[in-house]
């Protein structure tokens, strides 16, 4: 049993600065696009890092699970569900995909929902001291035999990294729940991403020619300006085969892989792709893995089940 992407959605609504609300809206959109009822979801993973009021307990995934009404009651005939946070900066979604596949691939979970996104803890939009775009994103995964599923994860680390974001609770005083300081990291996200992608391409037997023919597509985040074009140049692949994030959107940080995936879908890059490389990167680490939406058979390529995209 492999794992397929059933639907994806992002929410950048400007009427709220709450990550909980933005992620829940994206989750509802993904479920509605796939025509999957919340009670059929058995797993919710939150990969978003920055959240409302710096809440640490309960897990953010549990709060979003409640808003989505996933598995709120245990009764005969209902799918049992659980949720947890999996935080790893800009590459959290990549690790969440690998984790979710451990459950869907074994048949323990039929549908798994990954949510990601970030917002300033004050929930105020457009703060100059917060470098990331407030958004929520969701990726709905399903156990199936109609897709090739995901490959191995490939990572690159910057070594010993210092803190790049923290809340100075003593200095903030009574405003501690709304306090956040984000500083520049010491690593190079472009160099880390190149290392991770090169390892992934070698491990999956992919070459630059596969990108030139449309066989392979790379999904790029936006940790620094011009990241998509600069990464394509370093890898020696056509920039047209790299789906990035509109500069107008900015840097959605943990939600970047979903934004890039939907961007590739809207550009038609996924229509004939056989290898879709998911990539997450920041100053501390990078991670990528290949998604194969089609199954390679002796008779050729068999398309996976219909996939729906919602923005």
Image (spheres, rainbow, N blue to C red):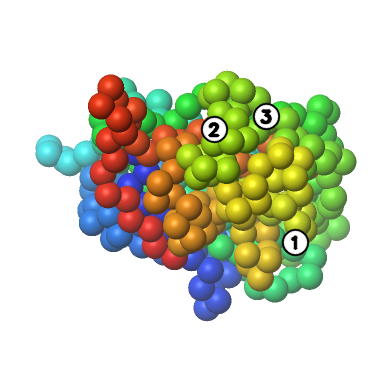
Q: Are marks 1 and 3 in contact (CB under 8 Å)?
A: no
- Return the residue nearer the eye: 259 or 74: 259
Q: Is residue 31 above or below residue 196?
A: below
- CA gap, disc 2 to disc 3? 11 Å
Residue drawn at x 56%, y 29% as measured from the top left: 206
- Say few, some or many: other residues with alpha carbon within 10 Å of mark 3 (under 14 / 14 to 19 / 20 or more): some
State the image coordinates of residue 45 (x, y, percent, origin top left).
Answer: 45, 42
Quadrant in the picture for residue 203 = top right
Residue drawn at x 12%, y 37% as measured from the top left: 76
Mark positioned earlier in the residue sequence (2 or 3): 3
For label 2, the SS is strand
Q: Quadrant of the C terminus?
A: bottom left
Q: Which residue is mark 3?
A: 198
Q: Which residue is mark 1?
A: 131
Mark positioned earlier in the residue sequence (1 or 2): 1
> Is residue 127 at least partly visible in the picture?
yes
State the image coordinates of residue 159 (x, y, percent, origin top left).
Answer: 81, 27
For label 3, the SS is helix
Question: Which residue is the extreme one toward the left?
Answer: 77
- Return the residue nearer the eye: 131 or 269: 269
Q: Are marks 1 and 2 in contact (CB under 8 Å)?
A: no
Checking the image for residue 289, the label placed there is 2
Q: Quadrant of the N terminus?
A: top left
- Return the residue nearer the eye: 190 or 65: 190
């Amino acid at each position: 049993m492999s794992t397929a992407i059933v639907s994806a959605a992002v929410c950048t609504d400007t009427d709220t600065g709450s990550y909980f609300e933005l992620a829940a809206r994206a989750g509802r959109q993904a479920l509605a696009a796939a025509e999957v009822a919340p009670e059929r979801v058995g797993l919710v993973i939150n990969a978003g890092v920055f959240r409302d009021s710096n809440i640490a307990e309960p897990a953010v995934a549990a709060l979003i699970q409640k808003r989505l009404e996933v598995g709120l009651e245990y009764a005969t005939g209902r799918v049992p569900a659980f949720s947890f946070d999996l935080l790893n900066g800009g590459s959290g979604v990549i690790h969440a995909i690998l984790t979710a596949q451990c459950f869907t691939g074994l048949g323990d979970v039929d549908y798994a929902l990954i949510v990601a996104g970030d917002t300033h803890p004050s929930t105020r939009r457009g703060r100059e001291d917060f470098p990331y775009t407030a958004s929520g994103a969701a990726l709905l995964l399903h156990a199936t035999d109609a897709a090739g599923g995901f490959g191995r994860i490939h990572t690159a680390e910057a070594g010993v990294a210092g803190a790049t974001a923290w809340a100075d609770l003593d200095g903030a005083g009574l405003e501690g729940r709304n306090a956040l300081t984000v500083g520049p990291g010491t690593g190079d996200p472009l160099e880390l991403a190149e290392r991770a992608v090169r390892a992934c391409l070698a491990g999956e037997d992919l070459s630059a020619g596969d990108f030139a023919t449309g066989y392979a597509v790379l999904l790029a985040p936006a940790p620094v300006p011009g990241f998509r074009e600069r990464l394509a140049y370093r890898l020696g692949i056509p920039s047209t085969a790299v789906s990035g994030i509109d500069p107008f959107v900015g840097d959605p940080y943990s939600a970047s892989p979903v934004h890039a995936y939907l961007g590739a879908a809207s550009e038609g890059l996924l229509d004939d792709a056989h290898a879709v490389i998911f990539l997450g990167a920041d100053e501390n680490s990078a991670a990528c893995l290949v998604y194969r939406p089609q199954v390679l058979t002796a008779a050729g390529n068999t398309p996976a089940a219909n996939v729906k995209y919602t923005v």
